[in-house]
Amino acid sequence: MNDFAKAQRPTPKAGVMDIAAYVPGKATVQGVAKIHKLSANESPLGASPHAVEAYRATDHYLSSYPDGEVTALRQAIAETQGLNIENILCGNGSDELLGLLCQTYLAPGDEAIFTDHGFLVYKIQTLAAGAKPVIVKENDTVIDVDAVLAAVTDKTKVVFITNPGNPTGTYVPFEEVKRLHAGLPPHVLLVLDAAYAEYVRKNDYEAGVALVSASDNVVMTRTFSKIHGLPALRIGWMYAPLHVTDAVNRIRGPFNMNSAAIAAGTAAIRDREHVQKACAYNAEWAQWLTDEFTKLGLKVTPSVTNFLLVHFPDTQNKSAAKADEYLQSKGYILRRVTSYGFPEALRMSIGSEEANRGVIAALTEFLKS
Ligand SMILES: *Cc1c(COP(=O)(O)O)cnc(C)c1O
């Protein structure tokens, strides 16, 4: 195409071409038949059988529009979590909700704050809204509340906190989250991304419901992609003050949730037993893997989630890049996390027993060689 034709064609608005597109975790390795995908924090237990059944039953409704108000799913969330249905808004994955919040509250000239190991979607959506990302350093692998507060300016409109963190697996106690909130001006929206909340077994952790209820500027986002094992259907929800759900409702797609997602999500969140099973399974294997990595001489960041951040020595032949290459050749796909600020680490999702044991066996070989 010549320059004249290029200059004539439609051009994206300012900033769009500066965005680095999100790169999902790999799912295949060429030439390796049996793959264990441990790169996307998917649940090794899969979805609840009731969710699968509810999903299958939706094939009768393909010619009807879904319920634009998502009543069944919002009702199920409200009942199981003890929340008011009016304050719940669902999205096509929490990714969509994060984007909608940016579109609703950020304009060119505004700033959004998040930490250097925060979720990459915040940056993409902040830039897409024309606003400026302000990135605050974590204290090693943990969010530093004072550093976040120090970055607030007149232009700050949104603060994103991943709690627990991804890819760190660490968490901030609720007292610290409350201290962060107390230090923010009332016009700043605090978004608590609690994608891994169900896995946390710590008395001083809370996903943020109490803070949302008690204030006008806090939103909590949650997902069905992790413990509920339904990432393919794209189901997220947020719990927010009514003035926030009212604003976001005005710009979301009128049918942003499809019927299969609504049906499967409704059944999934009502299956408390499946959630408990997934949580117990995760705790057991997270501990086992942490112990095994440690025995191999690898440092693991203490995790409250369904994944581990494993650090490799910076000797050339035992680096994270080399370990990743070796593991892939054996069929184990972990996640490189260079773009999250950890070039020397790999993130491993807790997998099936076979996958977990396999990774440890492969790394034992790798480190010996
Ligand atoms: C997985 C994840 C989500 C969930 O995304 P969905 O769009 O709901 O699949 C959100 N935030 C973080 C930090 C995550 O790791």
Image (cartoon, helix red, strand yellow):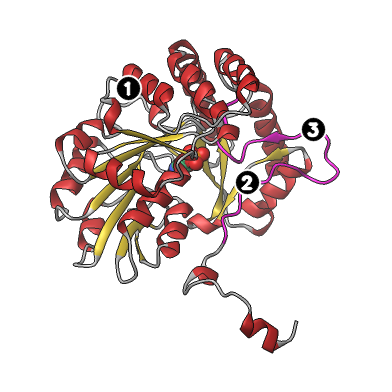
Quarter of the image for the N terminus: give it: bottom right
Q: Residue at x 36, y 21 (%)?
A: 75
Three-letter code for the amino acid on which mark 3 is drawn:
Lys
Residue span colored magenta: 21-44
Q: Residue furthest front?
A: 64
Question: Dot 2: few (<14), some (14–19), or many (≥20) neighbours within 10 Å?
Answer: some
Q: Nearer the viewer, mark 3 or mark 1?
A: 1
Q: Is residue 187 left or right of residue 255?
A: left
In the image, residue 200 lies at what x, y percent? 38, 28
Q: Name the residue tied to disc 3.
A: 34
Q: Is residue 115 visible?
A: yes
Q: Is residue 183 left or right of residue 161?
A: left
Q: Earlier in the sequence, mark 3 or mark 2?
A: 2
Q: Earlier in the sequence, mark 3 or mark 1?
A: 3
Three-letter code for the amino acid on which mark 1 is drawn:
Ala
Identify the element where label 3 is drawn.
loop
Three-letter code for the amino acid on which mark 2 is drawn:
Gly
Q: What kind of secondary structure does the magenta stretch mostly adopt?
A: loop
Identify the element where label 2 is drawn.
loop
Q: Which mark is residue 21?
A: none
Residue 57, by quadrant, is: top right
Q: Residue at x 47, y 72 (%)?
A: 15
Instruction: Identify which residue, 267 or 18, lies in the foreground.
Output: 267
Q: CA distance from mark 2 to mark 1?
A: 32 Å
Q: Residue furthest right?
A: 31
Q: Which mark is residue 25?
A: 2
Q: Is residue 142 left or right of residue 272?
A: left
Q: CA distance from mark 3 to mark 1?
A: 41 Å
